[in-house]
Amino acid sequence: MKTIGLLGGMSWESTASYYRLLNEGVRQRLGGLHSAKILLHSVDFHEIDEHMRAGAWDAAGAQLAAAARALQAAGADCILIGTNTLHRVAPAVAAAITVPLLHVADATAVPVRAAGLSTVGLLGTRFVMEQDFYIGRLREQHGLSVLVPGAQERPAIHRIIFEELVLGKRIEASRAALQAIMAGLVARGAGGIILGCTEFALLVGPGDATVPLFDTTSLHVVQALDWALSAG
């Protein structure tokens, strides 16, 4: 079994899900007392959030690149960035290491395509929904057409993430709001919805939409487990 290096703390709520799912996955696949080999570098999310708010992506990238190098030096055989939004700096992280960086958008696109879908909706932070680092990868490397909520809906989604989910709050009114937004994406032609924030699965699940939901956290974990348990 290879060792997974996880850049976490963004937020620690979803990092806890990563840790649980990775270990559950290894136990399910190998049985007995097996558990995942994980090295975790958990950052102070306040510092990262300040970089994001200021548009200081180079600073965020440098911080995560240094953490990734430390994980590799400690014995990590691959690196996961345990957040969708900070894949904005994935190129900087990948350039700092010689082990593979397993990209969450790739992990998500594979089952989307396997389901026969070509058009999907995407929920995430405003950075994920409005910038091209994520949507562009889905489009250019996986041939997906991506629909995002309207300009009047995106601030509400961003607020739910940063003022509720990363603080461990699960509010029913927010769940209902996300249900309505997903229904709108389906009405526009989305055959599935990508939950492009690692905290979304803490609030919504398959019963909240009429089309398949693709939880990026669990799919990223599957990608990592496939890689860590593969031969070679």
Image (tube, rainbow, N blue to C red):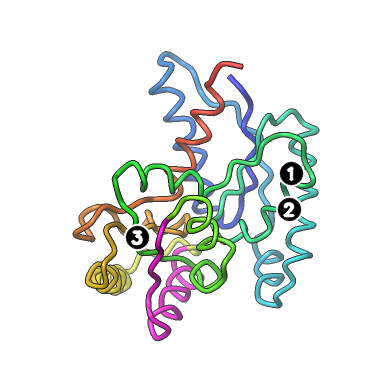
Residue 203: % across, % down: 34, 59
Residue marked by disc 1: 68
Give the Cα distance between marks 1 and 3.
31 Å
Q: Secondary structure at mark 1?
A: helix
Residue 31: % across, % down: 40, 16
Residue 215: % across, % down: 39, 50
Residue 172: image quadrant is: bottom left
Residue 51: % across, % down: 71, 70
| Kind of residue indicated by mark 1 | Ala
| Kind of residue indicated by mark 2 | Leu
| Kind of residue indicated by mark 3 | Val
Residue located 78% across and 65% down the image: 59
Which residues lie in the magenta part?
144-165
- Sequence order check, earlier mark of 3 and 2: 2
* Residue 120 numbered mark, or none: 3
Residue lying furthest bottom in this view?
152
Q: Nearer the viewer, residue 86 or 163?
A: 86
Residue located 38% across and 69% down the image: 147
Left of 60 or right of it: where is 115?
left
Residue 187: image quadrant is: bottom left
Image quadrant occupied by the C terminus = top right
Q: Secondary structure at mark 3?
A: strand
Disc 1 and disc 2 in contact, CB within 8 angstroms: yes
Q: Secondary structure at mark 2?
A: helix
State which mark lies toward you, 3 or 2: 3
For label 2, the crowd category at 10 Å Cα-Cα, with few meaning under 14, some 14 to 19 and many 20 or more, is many
Residue marked by disc 2: 64
